[in-house]
Amino acid sequence: MAILLGDVGGTNARLALARNGSIDTRTVTRFRGDDYASFDDVVRQFLQEQDQPRVSAVCIAVAGPVSGGQARLTNRPWDFDEDRLARLTDADHVRLINDLTALGYATPSLGGDGVAVLRTAPADRARNGQALVVNLGTGFNVCAVRSLPGGAITALEAEEGHTQLPANIYLRLLDAVGPEAIKGFTSTEETFAGRGLSRLHAALTHTAPVPGEQIDRAADAGDPVANATYDLFADLVGLLCRELALRFMPLDGLFLAGSVGRSIADRMDLFQASFLAESFMRHIPENTPIYLIRDDMAALQGCLAALS
Ligand SMILES: Nc1ncnc2c1ncn2[C@@H]1O[C@H](COP(=O)(O)OP(=O)(O)OP(=O)(O)O)[C@@H](O)[C@H]1O
């Protein structure tokens, strides 16, 4: 019987069925959160469309903290409950996990077109069995991954988006946007998620915030302020990733993810300049390879791995 997998972010929810140990790619469906009152409504519609009234197991990755079989999306008022999902799907086994934990579980199986190499590190000998996923999307979070003997991995939960900004990032922002606009940059997530990019652009243009995809398109079309926004943003993401590299030592790889993460991939020169800034322990960022997760289904793969 089929397994139900889900990746629920603040903007989009993706659902799929897996059969015989792999995702049935024909079933992958994206739902816009704004169009539904609850996640249960999304599940009901999906199972009906797939003509699949019951499944054997369920694993849903949620962009928010998970505890005691329950979860709540950070950036949308949806809640999740393993027992309720079991009743809805008739499944014997239901598991909720954090969406970044799911991406962490997916890292060993990423390959081919699913991942792009943004920077190679000089020495394979530096590998230490540790990796880090850094997601810039509707929200911001990280997942530290540790490889265990025998090929298993463990993925750690975190709420990095709700930490304070490092002082060097705060000061660089203060310099760029001034003492009034700096008040909006209250956390790592408010600075580095999609609304952080929008906030930065609004502060530099003195206009109302517009969505990140609009800034990306304007930058590609040669708009000077959109490009200045991205130049500063890529520089700040480099500084942040340098902090994260020192904190987690992900010498097997730092994996950027999320739509905002993907939008800075072609601005890696500015990112690298701050990522590799001259400093104590510079060899740690220097020995950290950087990858971009391009596979939109990576979190679903991680959900499947979490059930095995
Ligand atoms: N090309 C782009 N450039 C910059 N920002 C973008 C681009 N496309 C989408 N965004 C922004 O990315 C955010 C959505 O991120 P993503 O597509 O990773 O969704 P999500 O999975 O719902 O997010 P999360 O898992 O963080 O809750 C929105 O803030 C959106 O405005």
Image (tube, rainbow, N blue to C red):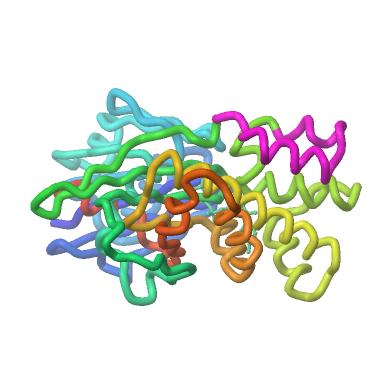
User: Is 168 part of what is drawn in magenta?
Assistant: yes
Magenta residues span 163-185
Residue 47 sits above or below residue 164 on the image? below
Q: Tell me what residue is drawn at x 53 percent, y 32 percent.
A: 77
Q: Main secondary structure of the magenta part?
A: helix
- Left or right position of 256 against 207: left
- Left or right position of 141 against 231: left
- Left or right position of 246 against 279: left
Q: Position of residue 93 (x, y in %)?
A: 16, 39
User: Is 257 part of what is drawn in magenta?
Assistant: no
User: From this viewpoint, is residue 170 visible?
Assistant: yes
Closest to the observer, 287 or 184? 287
- Left or right position of 200 against 208: left
Q: Position of residue 168 (x, y in %)?
A: 67, 38
Residue 300 sits above or below residue 63 on the image? below
Q: Tell me what residue is drawn at x 41 percent, y 62 percent.
A: 289
**Quadrant hosting residue 295:** bottom left
**Quadrant hosting residue 231:** bottom right
User: From this viewpoint, is residue 301 visible?
Assistant: no
Residue 202 sits above or below residue 190 on the image? below
Q: Position of residue 101 (x, y in %)?
A: 34, 43
Looking at the rendered image, the quarter that the N terminus falls into is bottom left
How many numbered marks have been drawn onto this rendered protein structure? 0
Q: Please, which residue is most extreme toward the top here?
A: 68
Closest to the observer, 109 or 254? 254
Q: Please, which residue is most extreme toward the left here?
A: 150
Q: Position of residue 213 (x, y in %)?
A: 68, 61
Q: Tell me what residue is drawn at x 76 percent, y 45 percent.
A: 199
Q: Tell me what residue is drawn at x 86 percent, y 32 percent.
A: 179
